Structure formats: structure tokens, C-alpha cells
Amino acid sequence: MEENPFNLLYVLRVIRQYLVYILVVVGLSGLLAFILTLPAIYPPEYRSSAIIYPTSAERYDLFNMFHEEPNMYLYGGAKEVEKLDNIANSDPVRFFVIDSLDLWQAYGVDPENDASPRYYVLRTYNGNVKTTRVSGNGLEIEAYDVDPERAAAIVNLVIAQVDAINKDMLVSNKEHLLGLYRQSAARLQGQIAQYEDSARALRAEYNVLASLTQSEVIAEQVLMAEGDLGAARAALREAQRKGQATAGLEMEVRRLEGKVAALTRRSSGSAMNLEKFRDGMDKVKAVEDVLTSLAEDLKNLAERVQYLELMDQVAYSTILIPEQAQPADKKARPVRWVILLATLLIASLVSIMGTVLIDRLIHWGKNAQSASAGAVS
């Protein structure tokens, strides 16, 4: 017997030949799908959802807060969305929602008697509650349930828990920062005390009582002493020229020279010495410049500590919610016509493929019998 070629005409011939069987299989499949999607067997589920946006982490970035031109943005970025997504899908949030709304009973799981109750309740929960990242760095949280009120409650409770856990993480980080800042403040205060002691010791060693005023007084005394010395020397020269007695004038010149030396020479040991004062003033100024810098750092730390402490007194949220989840008034699944259409299409394809395969097997069997009969004859 000649082998039938496998082409479109052959497939159409097989469909026509076995059309009744194909229609029976498709009809039974459609009837079964219709029965299985009845509300009594597959209760309709309602969808409730809400979109949340993370607040910008820079709103709580203390280093950024004290910049001259801080970059402040209302919404967070992709990293904040990822963190919210991870929190929403964490076991603490899942079981908090399950326990709070008694989803054990709603999902038909007995936590005391069933084997692996956590596995089964989470499997159902994960099939009904989903998170999806949306454009604009948002996170959509959706829930399906046979009770529209409960579906909305699930979404809103997930959002509340995400905010609470995220806030706890922020508070924990804040406490850690507070500890670091207070340690830094204590260290700065210790350094400031040391430098203040050093400044007092230098002022006492170099007799630096004031800065500009004392410098002006010493400089004025130097000028006056040098002027008196110049006048005494001129008088001495005049007396020597005239042949007058000079003993008194010479003593006065030596006294004034000693006074000028005491005021100007570093080695004189005088308490009122310009060079010594300048050396001491330079050292005191260097120490006081460090003191000023340390005091500014301490002031900035105090402002940051104050900001962190104020956060405990202000109610804030780590997420932005345009609208809370609301109960739906129309079922979301199952979509019966989609299920029926998909069932009919699949049943048709499987039936056609099955009949073609059966027909080919029948022809192969007949060909084999013909070949055997020819060999015997």
C-alpha cells in the first residue's frame, strides 16, 4: 500500500474523517472547563492594589542636610524601591499579615494539625499577594481574595508593615549615628580642653595677655625708649663737643640702651619683650586656630545630634501613598471566557494531533501487513 504524504491536504482529510470524535473531545473539554469555573467550584476573586513610593534617603542624609546647597528630592531611587520590595516579600511581613487577618482559616490551612502548615499557607499567600515595580520608582502591591474587603485590608496592612519596618531600620541607623556623633563630640571636647590648657600655658610663658592691645603697648614702649635713647645720645655728643661733663649722660644712655635691649632682644628675659611676645603670639594664634576649627566641628556635631533627636518627636513616614487600597466591586479572576477559549483551542489542537497520529499508525500497520503478505506469497 502506498504511503500517504504528510501535508496540509492530508491533515484536512483526517480532520474531516474524524470530525465527530474531535467535536466530542472539544465539547467535553469545554463543558469541563465551564463546570470547573463555576462560582461554586472556583469562587471569584477580587483584586485590590495600591502604589507606594519611597521617600528620598537624602531627606535623612545628615551629611547632606548641612551642605550649603543640599540636594533634596521628594522621591527615593531604585535602591529604596528595592529595599521596600524586599521588606514587603519578607517572612516577617507575610506572617504578620497572615496572623493579623487570620488567613490560615481563609486559605484552609490548620496551623496545628496540618503537615507543613507554613509551607502551604505561604504558597497560597504568594499566589494571591504580589509586588511589582512600576515606572517612576514606585512599587505596586496587589492582593486577590474572595472577599473584596479582605483583599484591600491585606494591601493596606502590607503597606503599614513595610513603613513600620523601614522606619525601625531608619531609627536603628539613627541610634547608631547618634552613638558615633556623641563619641566624636566627647573626643572633640577632650581635644578642646587640651588645647585650651596649652593656650593658657603659652600665654603665661610668653606673657601674652591680649593680642592687638598688648602688641601696640609694647611697640609704643619700644618707640618711646628708642626715641629717648636717640635724644640722650644726641645730648651726650653735644656735651662731648662742648667739653662739658658727660658722666650723667653716659649713665642715662646705658640705661636707655638696656631698656631698649630688654624690650627688643629675645634673650633679655624681660616680661615686656617685643620679640618674645611675637613668638608667643604666633604659637598662641596657631593653638587658637585649632581651637576655632575644633569648636566649629563640635557645633556641627551638636546640630546633627539635635536633628536626630528631633526625629523622635516628629511623626513621619518613609513612604508616600497616593491612595489607599479600596475594595473592588468587580471580580478579577477567573476570567471565564478566557479559560473557555484557551481550553477549546488546546483541546482542538490536541484532538487534531491525536487523530493524525492514530491515522498514521493505522496506515503504518496496514503497510506492514501488506509487506508481510507479499513476502509469504
Image (cartoon, rainbow, N blue to C red):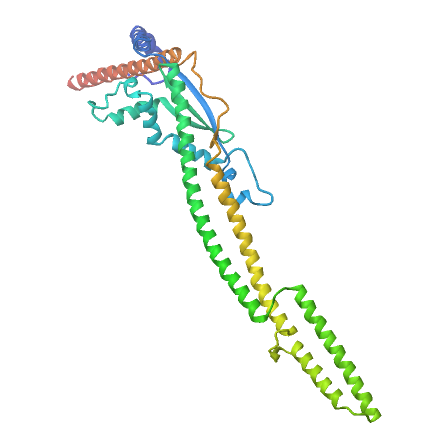
Q: Residue at x 37, y 30 (%)?
A: 89
Q: Position of residue 77 (x, y in %)?
A: 50, 36
Q: Give the number of callouts.
A: 0
Position of the N terminus, as image quadrant, is: top left
User: Outermost residue, bottom direction?
Assistant: 243
Q: Pick the residue in front: 66 or 345.
A: 66
**As displayed, is residue 117 above or below residue 46?**
below
Position of the C terminus, as image quadrant, is: top left
Quadrant hosting residue 270? bottom right
Q: Position of residue 262 (x, y in %)?
A: 65, 78
Q: Is residue 21 left or right of residue 176?
A: left
- Is any part of residue 61 visible from this angle? no
Q: Pick the residue in front: 296 or 9.
A: 296
Q: Pick the residue in front: 280 or 205.
A: 205
Q: Residue at x 28, y 21 (%)?
A: 104
- Is any part of residue 240 visible from this angle? yes
Q: Pick the residue in front: 254 or 27.
A: 254
Q: Residue at x 47, y 40 (%)?
A: 309
**As displayed, is residue 111 above or below residue 13?**
below
Q: Position of residue 356 (x, y in %)?
A: 30, 15
Q: Is residue 223 left or right of residue 167?
A: right
Q: Is residue 355 left or right of residue 291?
A: left
Q: Position of residue 47 (x, y in %)?
A: 41, 17
Q: Residue at x 55, y 36 (%)?
A: 73
User: Outermost residue, right direction?
Assistant: 242
**As displayed, is residue 35 above or below residue 242?**
above
